[in-house]
Image (cartoon, rainbow, N blue to C red):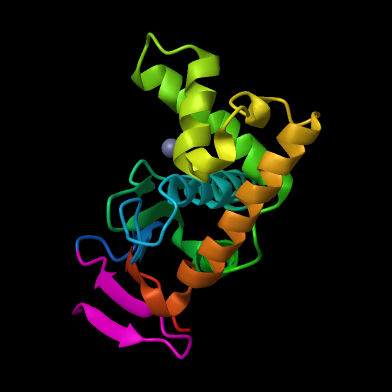
């Protein structure tokens, strides 16, 4: 069995690595890599990471509950690329891939997903810099996500979405998320690498 490379009709590059060591291995591992990251010009710096959490966290939950699979640690936003890693039982390969692609190339994240992604990222900031308070972490996120201009005097706004300032901030963030998803979450800008014994076809 050899590695195969194809471009699907929707433009997605598909690379399948045969599971040569054990054709009966019941698990498929894979990753979708998008050709965009947090340092790409014309991308609002915090948005790729935010969207990664909107899609990746939901996908993880769905993979766990529906197929007994999960997203892997290599789900990560880099400078120039964003990768979603996953694994699931090969028996569910086709359905699980449909789910993954439907989420990554599918509808815009909802306001609820964006809010909960903001909470997740706040936690990551706090964890990475142990001395940073939750308030400072939110202030930092607000700056990188939406640009300083939006943020003057609204440092806590993302944390208090009940306030009109908070709602306004969230709407601006949502607009950034939507234009990012529209421009970059496209199959034609991505590659899917699979290691599987399942003969996947588009
Ligand atoms: Zn993260």
Quarter placement of the N terminus:
bottom left
How many numbered discs, if any?
Answer: 0
Report the side of 42 relative to 152 (left or right).
left
Q: What percent of the width, then of the height, locates residue 6?
A: 31, 86
Residue 196 falls in image quadrant: bottom left
Q: Is residue 19 magenta?
A: yes
- The vertical placement of 177 against 115, above or below, is below
Report the side of 169 relative to 84 (left or right).
right
Q: What percent of the width, then of the height, locates residue 187?
A: 45, 76
Query: At 37% across and 11% down in the image, what residue appears?
Result: 130
Query: At 75% across and 39% down in the image, what residue appears?
Result: 167
Query: At 45% across and 44% down in the image, what residue appears?
Result: 46
Q: Residue furthest top?
A: 131
Query: At 21% across and 67% down in the image, what residue appears?
Result: 20
Report the side of 157 relative to 92 (left or right).
right
Ligand 1, what quadrant?
A: top left
- The vertical placement of 23 against 63, above or below, is below
Q: What percent of the width, then of the height, locates residue 184?
A: 46, 68
Magenta span of residues: 1-20
Q: Is residue 80 magenta?
A: no
């Amino acid at each position: 069995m050899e590695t195969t490379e194809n471009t699907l009709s929707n433009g997605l590059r598909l690379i399948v690595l045969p599971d040569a060591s054990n054709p009966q291995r019941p698990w498929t591992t894979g990753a979708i890599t998008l050709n965009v990251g947090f340092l790409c010009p014309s991308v609002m710096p915090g948005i790729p990471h935010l969207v990664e959490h909107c899609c990746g966290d939901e996908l993880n939950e769905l993979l766990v509950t529906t197929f007994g699979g999960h997203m892997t640690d290599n789900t990560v936003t880099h400078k120039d690329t964003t990768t979603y890693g996953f694994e699931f039982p090969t028996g569910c390969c086709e359905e699980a891939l449909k789910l993954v692609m439907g989420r990554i190339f599918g509808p815009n994240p909802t306001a609820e997903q964006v809010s909960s992604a903001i909470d997740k990222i706040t936690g990551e900031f706090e964890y990475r810099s142990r001395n940073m308070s939750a308030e400072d972490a939110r202030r930092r996120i607000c700056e990188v996500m939406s640009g300083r201009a939006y943020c003057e005097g609204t440092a806590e706004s993302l944390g208090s979405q009940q306030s009109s300032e908070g709602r306004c901030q969230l709407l601006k963030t949502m607009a950034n998320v939507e234009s990012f998803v529209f421009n970059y979450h496209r199959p034609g800008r991505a590659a899917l690498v699979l290691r599987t014994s399942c003969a996947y076809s588009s």
